[in-house]
Image (spheres, helix red, strand yellow):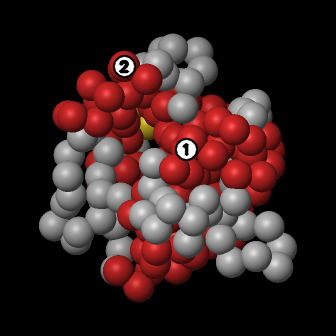
Amino acid sequence: MTLAKNQKSSLSRLYKKVSSKRSESSRNLEDESRTSSNSSGSSSLNVNELRTVFDYMDANSDGKISGEELQSCVSLLGGALSSREVEEVVKTSDVDGDGFIDFEEFLKLMEGEDGSDEERRKELKEAFGMYVMEGEEFITAASLRRTLSRLGESCTVDACKVMIRGFDQNDDGVLSFDEFVLMMR
């Protein structure tokens, strides 16, 4: 997996973390405006959603993401980027050469790293593994709660059951990998 793909996965997780704090009504309105899919068939975030992630990462609200801000946000997600990796990401994304990633550059970065279906499936398998308890093959309410807690979100098991119910196609109370894939679209 390339550095940019690692960063995009981390940024996607960051988006999910940030967006989970929005109100339900706001989420429903944005769901209606969500873009369905790009040419590779994977779902894409719309500009408003990407703005939410960008603004969260732009800690000092100067309209640019510095290497330090990028590194800090990836770290919040349990990931790690070395100073050299951060420098490489900024250098390859920074079109205007100012040493920062502005919103337009951020959009290009996020939209330009789709990869093949096989790579996407591998990434989803890795993400799925973060939520599954050892020895299990599905996401339970307890395992979802545990993972969300690691990301700094407090959530009850009952609330996690409600989240799972939204994507649980066979009503068994857990999410299989296939159901997880549908959820991530």
Residue 94 vs residue 65, the one in the foreground: 65
x then y, percent, for residue 133: 80, 67
Q: Is residue 11 rendered to the left or right of residue 92? A: right
Label 2 sits on a secondary structure element that is: helix
Q: Is residue 158 above or below residue 57?
A: below
Amino acid found under the numbered disc labelled 1: Met
Q: Is residue 19 rendered to the left or right of residue 17? A: left
Q: Which mark is residue 25?
A: 2
Q: Is residue 16 rendered to the left or right of residue 160? A: left
Res. 62 visible in picture: yes
Q: Indicate the quadrant where residue 169 lies.
A: bottom left
Residue 111 vs residue 139, the one in the foreground: 139
Residues packed near mark 2 inside 10 Å, few (<14), some (14 to 19) or many (20 plus)? few
Spatial CA span between label 2 and label 1: 16 Å
Q: Quadrant of the C terminus?
A: bottom left
The residue most toward the right is: 134
Residue at image location 63% in from the left, 46% down from the top: 161
The residue most toward the front is: 171
**Of the residues under marks 2 and 1, which one precedes in the sequence?**
2
x then y, percent, for residue 183: 43, 57
Q: Is residue 158 above or below residue 60?
A: below
Amino acid found under the numbered disc labelled 2: Ser
x then y, percent, for residue 103: 35, 31
Residue that mark 1 sits on: 163
The residue most toward the top is: 61
Res. 4 visible in picture: no
Q: Is residue 103 above or below residue 112?
A: above
Q: Is residue 69 above or below residue 112?
A: above
